[in-house]
Structures are given as C-alpha cells and as structure tokens.
Image (cartoon, rainbow, N blue to C red):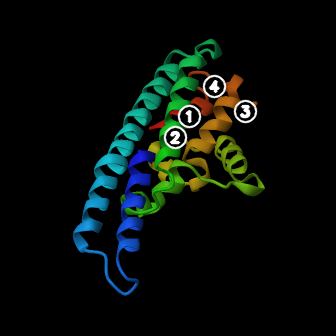
Amino acid sequence: PFKILTASLCLVASLAAARPATAEIPEAAYARVNRALTDGVVIPDYRKLAEATETFRQAADRFCRTGGTSDLEPVKKAYHGTMDAWMRVQPLTFGPVELFMRNFRLHFWPAGSGRVEKAVVEILADDKPITADGLRRASVAVQGLAAVELLLFGDRADKLRPGTRCCALFTAISG
C-alpha cells in the first residue's frame, strides 16, 4: 500500500513538474490517483480492519464465556491484529470513519490525563448493567482499543473472568 501511495504521489509530482506552474493537472490524472489509492489502499485496509475486529470480538467473547487468564494469549494475539489493522487506516481521516466520532470510538488517542483509565474505573465502579447500547452512550474514552488495552494488559487483566464487570465491559467494547 505504501508503494501505491508513493507511486501516486510521484505521479502527481511528475505531472506538476512537467507543466508550467500555471497549467492545471488534468482531471483524469487525479481520477487515476484517487482510484489507485481507493482500490489499492483504503478499501483493502478497511476490509482487513473489519476482519481483525471480528476475530478480536470472537476471541473476547470466547474468553469471557470460558474464562481463565491462561486463555488470554489468543485474545492478546487478536487484539494486536486489530491494533495493527487500525494503525494502517488511522491516518485516513476522511469518509465514514469521521461520522459519529468512529475514529475516536475505535482508538481514543492521545489519551492524556489518564482519561481512558478514569473512564474504565468509573464504568466498572458503577452498578448499572454494562450493555452495548449503554456503552455507545458512554465516553469515547471507554469505547475502544485504548480501554481494551487497559483491561487486557493492565493490572485488571487478572480480573477478566466470566461473570465479572471487567469481562462484561471487555466484551461490550470488543462488540
């Protein structure tokens, strides 16, 4: 994908350099570059993200149904796959990912002042049931990969057990 991006940028630069500064780049050249970026980078990388998040969701659900910290390795692997897929598309700050703050819902970053941890602690301390609908109404800081990272790798990882609020939050976020 970066080869396509580099090639596209080189194409635009060469078209611009080949003409006087006042000349316009033909619309067809822009269309070719946009098509190459869309078909070669954007769509395939978002498909990979969708596949990775589904794999992670299944691993989180399976873990919280069967439980035990000895079973965390497949969940961690799925998390890393999801984070890697997100990092590939994260710079693409246009289109549907901008609607309803989806980009921040996937990964609230930078999360200074401990906002993610505060949001996670707050929701875990509350006595309201943790549901997917309730989570959609909660702070974006508790909805995505940063919150999952705290639950999966932080000092709460030993509390990820079936029937716990940690697992309920974990599966709600992964969903």
Work out whether mark 1 precedes mark 3 in sequence or the reverse, and give the earlier one. 3
- The residues bearing labels 4 and 3 have C-alpha atoms spaced at a distance of 11 Å
Between residues 155 and 138, which one lies in front from this camera angle? 155
Q: Is residue 50 left or right of residue 115?
A: left
Amino acid on which disc 1 is placed:
Phe
Residue tagged by mark 3? 154
Q: Are marks 4 and 3 in contact (CB under 8 Å)?
A: no
Q: Is residue 137 visible?
A: no
* Mark 4 residue type: Leu
- Percent x, y of residue 101: 48, 60
Q: Of circles 3 and 2, which is in front?
A: 3
**Residue annotated with mark 1:** 170
User: Label 1's element?
Assistant: helix
Estimate the spatial distance between the alpha carbons at disc 2 and disc 4, rounded to whole Å.
13 Å
Pick the front one: 144 or 131: 144
Identity of the residue furthest to the top in this view: 70
Measure the alpha-carbon separation of dots 1 and 4: 8 Å
* Residue 70 place in picture, x, y as percent: 63, 12
Residue toward you, 33 or 114: 33
Task: Tell me which amino acid carries mark 3.
Answer: Gly
- The correct choice, above or below, for 131 with respect to 151 in the image is below
Q: Earlier in the sequence, mark 3 or mark 2?
A: 3
Q: Which residue is mark 4?
A: 160
- 126 displayed left or right of 105: right
Decide: few, some or many residues near mark 1? Use Cα within 10 Å; few <14, some 14-19, many ≥20. Answer: many
Q: Is residue 60 visible?
A: yes
Residue at 36%, 50% in the rendered image: 42
Instruction: Locate residue 65 relative to residue 73 in the image: left or right.
Output: left
Assess disc 2: are there few (<14), some (14-19) or many (≥20) residues with their C-alpha within 10 Å of its C-alpha. many
- Image quarter for residue 104? bottom right
